[in-house]
Amino acid sequence: MQEESVLKKVISILMSILFLVSSVFFVGCGKQDDGKPGEDPDNGSQGESDMTIDKGDSENPTYTFVTDGELAVSTVSRQDTINKLQATDDYGRSFGFMDGYKTDKERYVGLFYFTWLGWHGTQMQGVYDITKLIDENPDALWDTEGNAESPLGQYHYWGEPLYGYYNSKDPWVIRRQMELFTLSGIDFIAFDCTNGYDYIDVVSVILPIMQEMYDEGWDVPKFMFYLNTSSKKVLNDLYYGRVTSSDNVLEKEGIYKNGYYKNLWFAPEGKPKIAAITDPDSTNGEIGDPKDHIVTDPVLLNFFDFWESLWPNKEQYENGLPWMDWTKPQTIYTDTVNVSVAQHNKLPFSDALLSAELADEMWGRGYTLANGPDHSDDAIDAGLNFEEMWQNAIRYDVKYTFVTGWNEWVAIKNAAALGNNQQYEECRGKRVFFVDTVNREYSRDIEMMKDGYGDTAFLQLMRNTRTLKGASGQMAASAKTTVDIKQGMTQWSQVADVYFDVTGEGNRDYRGFTQDLQYKDDSLKNDIAEIRVAHDDENIYVLVVCEDDIVPNVESNNWMNLLIDVEGQDNDAFCGYDYIVNRQSSYTGDCSVEQYAKDGGKIAYKGKGVAKFTLGGKYMQFSIPKSALGITEDGFTINFKVADNVTEPENIQSYYISGDVAPVGRLNYIFKG
């Protein structure tokens, strides 16, 4: 035991050193030199370059080619693309190639998903951000009578999502979420209906988007519902439908009775999974009469494969689905375990902001069983709690790992004397409280936030899901093939290294959390569908295929950029990328190869060579000299992405929310030469 304690301390010290180093290392990636949450004041502009590409004659472009035939449809699966994804987070934690998924037994990773943003009208009348209120108007936040700036009974955001204060029905957001889940290997999402609402209006938008992706060949997550309060009625409506004046088919006819979206049901044993209350003696229903919660219809009891709805502070069931666990290390329920970002083990979570003692006893994002509370920015943003929970789950290696949660974001502001008021002096008497979430440290969202932890929690989810489910293996090197980019598509038909991107993202124009909040984004110009890569002794060749004819923009520095990380070069100027291709381009088909560099803490660019591109219809070809990328020998590996019209190209978070990026965000494709 003493040796184990020493080992834990050594690990803790090493982790602290890593965090201190990494917070300086990844300039421009959401962490600034002071280690505080990223606030780049001038993300829209770009640094200086020491090279200039002559634009040529805009009236007579010579970069076009005429194809000699159609590009053959690739037989490579979408899963092959997922296998060849790579990323490194702000703390140097990486994942890379996997050889598909393990086949020795079944493993499923599920994700608790929330559909309520903007759908509790009378309680969602404005955007009230707790973090901003703490900084700008704390008296309004903690006013037990409520006020215009922070009313009682209204849902408050704990912080700002990267997608903004969005509406759960926004298709632009939904498609991006489903893309992230699919690329991460998430097997199922559980729609949170624990408060007695089925949010069928939102689900009716999500399911068609999932179906479109499924039909395109993507292994999208399947869906189920997690019920608690009024689970008897909610499940009845989900199965049979209900009387309504709405023209929503799923609301009128239900989802399950008529087999709607059956190929998307999460049904690993044949019957669709559901979490609900079936025990006749259960008191686990949160609100109201127990008889309103308990499912008794024999048709439903026979149709579904039930998990018992499980609350961390109520009766426990071996066949329960734990969305939250207040034990450390977490409990195994037969073949199921929970992984959560943080735990409100002495609810309400907001009391952690009132009592220093409670701040240490609550299990925020930085808390671990190994080292106790850690309130530092690095511990919070690195997700030490989440990471420890994941390592336990990987060690347990059970059939189902259920993760809480993706996008909760809000909690109701209440005022009363309850919970911790008897034990902690600061919490006595009537006080403002938020039960489930309150700020960056005491919250459990994985979805990317603006500033703060950024995309770290998402990358943790993806990395650990791949560790749990992924099979190890070595990626095969690509055979050499020469491509003449002045010629057409038939030469690309036999190229084996093919990468797919999710299509159909479109531009954004949808209301936000409230009726008067509108989000618009028209930065998507070219919808990237597919990329092929080849190489010979001198060059790397890249083919970019879009859904429609490519809109050229030679005058821009963010048109069809290639960001490349050459393994072994370890450039630390921008998120691990070493080079950017086509930041400068010309009407003659010349384009820049620039190396990312630092200039007084800002990003700069050093010219390393000239590449060539050609354009024809929906196809764009590149020929990039290996010498310009510092590749001098065989046996190289590059991690790369294609990014078109990213609005803040020196801010990695912009690669999730603007233009089109393949693959999305901080993810990269792997090519081995």
Image (cartoon, grey):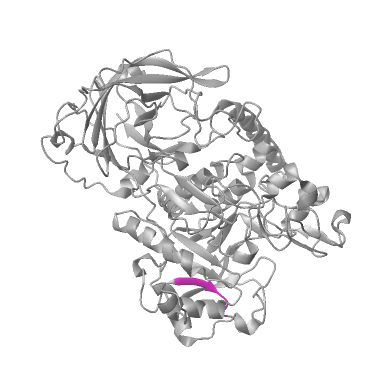
User: Left or right of 496: which side holds 509?
Assistant: right
Can residue 666 be seen in this snapshot?
no
User: Left or right of 421: which side holds 394?
Assistant: left
Q: Position of residue 288 (x, y in %)?
A: 67, 79
Question: Does residue 48 sit above or below 513 in this rendering?
Answer: above
Which quadrant: the C terminus?
top left
For image coordinates 74% across by 42% down, the residue present is: 136
Q: Is residue 266 magenta?
A: no
Q: Position of residue 385 (x, y in %)?
A: 64, 47
For image coordinates 61% across by 44% down, the residue present is: 383
Question: Does residue 150 sit above or below 39 in this rendering?
Answer: below
In this view, the residue in front, 13 or 443, is 443
Q: Position of residue 138 (x, y in %)?
A: 78, 47
Where, by quadrant of the figure, is residue 308 drawn?
A: bottom right
User: Left or right of 478: which side holds 472?
Assistant: right
User: Residue lying furthest right in this view?
Assistant: 425
Give the tally of numbered discs.
Answer: 0
Question: Does residue 327 sit above or below 45 in this rendering?
Answer: below
In this view, the residue in front, 341 or 230, is 230
Can residue 124 be seen in this snapshot?
yes
Magenta: main secondary structure equals strand
Question: Does residue 86 sit above or below 606 in this rendering?
Answer: below
Where, by quadrant of the figure, is residue 282 drawn?
A: bottom right
For image coordinates 49% across by 72% down, the residue present is: 274
Range shown magenta = 273-278
Q: Position of residue 541 (x, y in %)?
A: 25, 28
User: Residue lying furthest top in this view?
Assistant: 50
